[in-house]
Image (cartoon, helix red, strand yellow):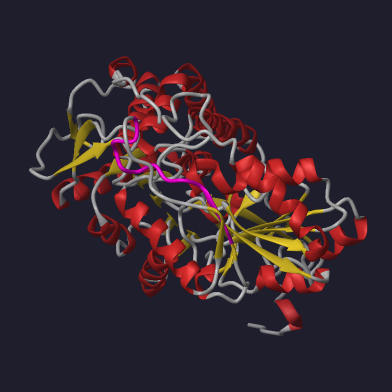
Amino acid sequence: MQTIEKIDMSAVLNELGLKEVNFGSSSGRDSFGNTSENLIASYSPVDGALIGKVSTTTKEEYEKIMSLAADAYKTWRKMPAPKRGEIVRQYGEALRKHKDALGRLVSYEMGKSLQEGWGEVQEMIDICDFAVGLSRQLYGLSMHSERPDHRMYEQWHPLGVVGIISAFNFPVAVWSWNSALAWVCGDVCIWKGSEKAPLCAVACQNILQEVLEANDLPEGISCIVTGDYKVGEWMTNDTRIPLISATGSTRMGRIVGQAVAGRFGRSLLELGGNNAIIVTPNADMKVMLTAAVFGAVGTAGQRCTTTRRLIVQHGIYDKVKELLTNAYGQLRIGNPLDTNNHVGPLIDKLAVDQYLHAISEAKKAGGRELVAGGVLSGTGYDSGCYVKPCIIEVDAQYDIVKHETFAPILYLMKYNELDEAIEMQNDVPQGLSSAIMTDSLREAEQFLSCAGSDCGIANVNIGTSGAEIGGAFGGEKETGGGRESGSDSWKFYMRRQTNTINYGTKVPLAQGIKFDL
């Protein structure tokens, strides 16, 4: 049992420009006033308290937002890329100033631990730093022409308006992955944040608008829209938005992907994960334990990169079970704003129902709870969203194991040979993140080979979660195939153009074709 004192977020909300219980139109800071009669109430999963209400975007407002964005793009695309990078740098500095407050809001509105809330804002700062450097490195290629006195090269141009649809579990970081890169590429952004964490989006918009105003830049460079799936449908079906970046469930991704493809737009999809760690007899058990436990219970299991399956070689299976059981017994579940706690609440009671359903299905199939789950109740758990991280011994073929449940449920299973373990890991519809725990170079290289992990992320001796912004983030199969953040992900936010210049006095044709006049 724990006690949660009444949490006073007034100072945090005041610092982030969220002073009133009912906030104005979320389309842009006070741009159109609170014209909508429909409000989204944001209740904290930490204590069930109402944080505030945000008005939903009306269709009329949406059209005004699109007009603002289109006009801003005409200005923004002509600004030299390093100058755009300077604006992103200033936003990164503003985030540093507000890191504590924004991290606390993320923790309170979403439910992740305060350490993870601060870490998410740091991720925003990091991607801003990355984008600033990138603004001087949007490289094209030069090619040799087969025709005399000709030069060939390629260059990259901005796409236009980029639509970003993000999920509740990373209510600010995933948006920043997209927006920071899109901005330096010359695009403008429209962001539909999660209706489960709408205040985080408004707070980020408020911080950014101060930077834009200080530089006398149009507010349409970044706008937010708020609402349910209908607002998302406006975006995905809008031919004025050439790229939709969507993070969420596989079900959502199928709808978005089909709609955008139907109008020949681009979609960048970051969807479900069902991530596994393979533990071999050559693993360092201390490294394995930290990586597996954080991967399984971090953000209360609500990461797309959460460790959901632990595939353990039969010879060390009992030892791993004992280590895990002891570690889970030390987990502290409670108020995520208390940095002594490891695990906070699930986002809402629907997530709790899905957690209970998954445990029930696993047990029906023959699974055995090694560490029992359940919903916590009593003083301090009044929101009804706190659950126990659990471990269930299963067979890899159980149907429930192949589905993603956004909750702290870890499935434990055995293997004999490494080939079998890799096959078990790959035998799910999703393909996001994966890891192997081993000090054997041969085992590590086998796992990383073309016959190894089929995931977009494959790690050795680190867990499945906690990706850095320097590498491209994303996965294969039902994870959607998208890549965000680092590496050359910037290319997705631009259009490639091949250019050929004839600086001679003749017009020779390619492939030796003759055409004389």
Using the rendered view, name the quadrant where residue 147 is placed. bottom right
396 above or below 2? below
239 above or below 226? below
The x and y percentages for residue 374 are: 42, 50
Which residue is nearer to you in this view: 82 or 449? 449
Tell whether position 388 is magenta.
yes
The x and y percentages for residue 114 are: 48, 28
Using the rendered view, name the quadrant where residue 129 is placed. top right
Side of 290 where 3 appears, left or right: left
Which residue is nearer to you in this view: 324 or 474? 324
Range drawn in magenta? 380-392
Using the rendered view, name the quadrant where residue 244 is placed. bottom left
The x and y percentages for residue 100 are: 46, 20
The x and y percentages for residue 307 are: 60, 53
Q: Quadrant of the N terminus?
A: top left
Side of 211 where 8 appears, left or right: left
For the point 47% across and 26% down, which residue is it?
Answer: 91
Residue 462 visible within the image: no
351 above or below 508? above
Q: Main secondary structure of the magenta part?
A: loop
Residue 38 visible within the image: yes
Side of 181 where 147 appears, left or right: right
For the point 72% across and 74% down, which residue is it?
Answer: 423
For the point 78% across and 48% down, which residue is it?
Answer: 461
For the point 25% across and 44% down, which residue is it?
Answer: 65
Side of 468 where 26 appears, left or right: left
Number of numbered callouts drawn: 0
Which residue is nearer to you in this view: 390 or 113? 390
Tell whether position 384 is magenta.
yes
Q: Quadrant of the C terminus?
A: bottom right
